[in-house]
Amino acid sequence: MNGRIRVLVADDSPIVREVLKDILGHAPDVQLAGEATDGRRALEMAISLKPDIVILDLAMPVMGGLRVLEILMAEQPMPVLVLSSFANKGSVSAVKALSIGALDVMEKPLGITEDEPMREFGEHLLEKVRSLSRIRVVSRPRAKSVVPDSVTPKLDANYISRVVAVGASVGGPAAVCKLLSGFPKAVPLAFVLVQHIPVGFLSGFIDWLTSEIQLTVAIGSEGMKLKAGHVIVAPEGRHMEVRGDTITLNDGPPVCYCRPAVDVLFKSVAIHFGPRAVGVVLTGMGSDGAEGIRAIKTYHGRTLAESEESCVVFGMPKAAIGTGKIDRVLPVTDMPREILALVAPE
């Protein structure tokens, strides 16, 4: 107690639990709330103990970590850090955990025996525990948006009415899915996306998102063309911009501590598409996207920000709203209808 961060450790490996307890035990501002050796016990302890954060393994006996997450986020949402041996592979399971509501993922320290790598792991873990435990987690059952026939545009398949630029960070996978699932495949919109996501998870995110929505999803590459009904996602570690109808990548310095950065993408969309640009800022930490929103409004585009009640983290939308350049603040599930209302042959 005494203001310390209360952590529940859920992992079936005695070795991993001992490592985690040792790390947590050396932090004066952190307290071990309990430890669970299987998924069902982890769920029971999380609900009864109400820790500030849960460190959760995915491969758990009795009840798997994904199922624990699903129930926990529906009944008693709280910060969850997934510690998984799959983290460095960008597995679909780990991406699914992020989409359900886990705030972040880390790779298990398996095979680490040297003092220095273990010390670095411990510092990184404590940094995440401290930052994630402060986040107010909001979760609702995911329901795909239904686009009524009356607002589903029927236009030439090659026609792009507008370019929708989307930025998201913590909590983004689920929010992005909710947004994009509200659009039919035959829509005259091209989508470009920056999703801040742990290194190694992008391909898994793309695979999962492709299975959930009607639009075509791909990782951006140099020279790729924008297409109606397609979503181009910025690759890991590179800024993504548009030049006319073409994707360009660069290794410029981080912006808002991020590369890829939402601001970089938004500014390029603003310059090249002007009033045909739509900027959407979804859940996430920090202020990335705010300056990009200013640019989109300067060039007379349309701007939307996710409302606080549907956000996992209200940082990025709040910063965007603070610019005074946001046209509408909406729950993410209401955004597809708002964007589709803009679609019409020009």
Image: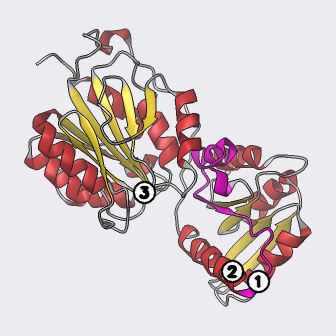
- Residue holding disc 2: 117
Q: Amino acid at mark 3?
A: Gly
Using residue 325 as the reference point, say whether residue 127 is left or right of it. Answer: right
Using residue 318 as the reference point, say whether residue 62 is left or right of it. Answer: right
- Residue holding disc 1: 114
Residue under the point 74% across and 87% down: 115
Q: Which residues are magenta?
A: 87-115
The circle drawn on residue 284 is 3
From what the image shows, is residue 49 above or below residue 196? Answer: below
Task: Name the front one of labels 2 and 3.
Answer: 2
Whether residue 12 appears in magenta in the rendering, the answer is: no
Percent x, y for residue 137? 55, 56
C-beta proximity under 8 Å, tags 1 and 2: yes
Residue under the point 45% across and 31% down: 217
Report, in whole angstroms, how far the alpha carbon at label 3 lies from the one at label 1: 35 Å
Using residue 256 as the reference point, say whether residue 122 is left or right of it. Answer: right
Q: Amino acid at mark 2?
A: Pro
Quadrant occupied by the N terminus: bottom right
Q: Determine if residue 326 is in view.
A: no
Please tell me whether mark 1 sits on a helix, a strand or a loop: loop
Q: Around disc 3, counting alpha carbons within 10 Å, would you say few (fewer than 14), some (14 to 19), or many (20 or more)?
A: many
Using residue 226 as the reference point, say whether residue 115 is left or right of it. Answer: right
User: On the image, which quarter does residue 271 sit in?
Assistant: top left
Residue under the point 20% across and 23% down: 161
Percent x, y for residue 160? 23, 23
Percent x, y for residue 206? 52, 38
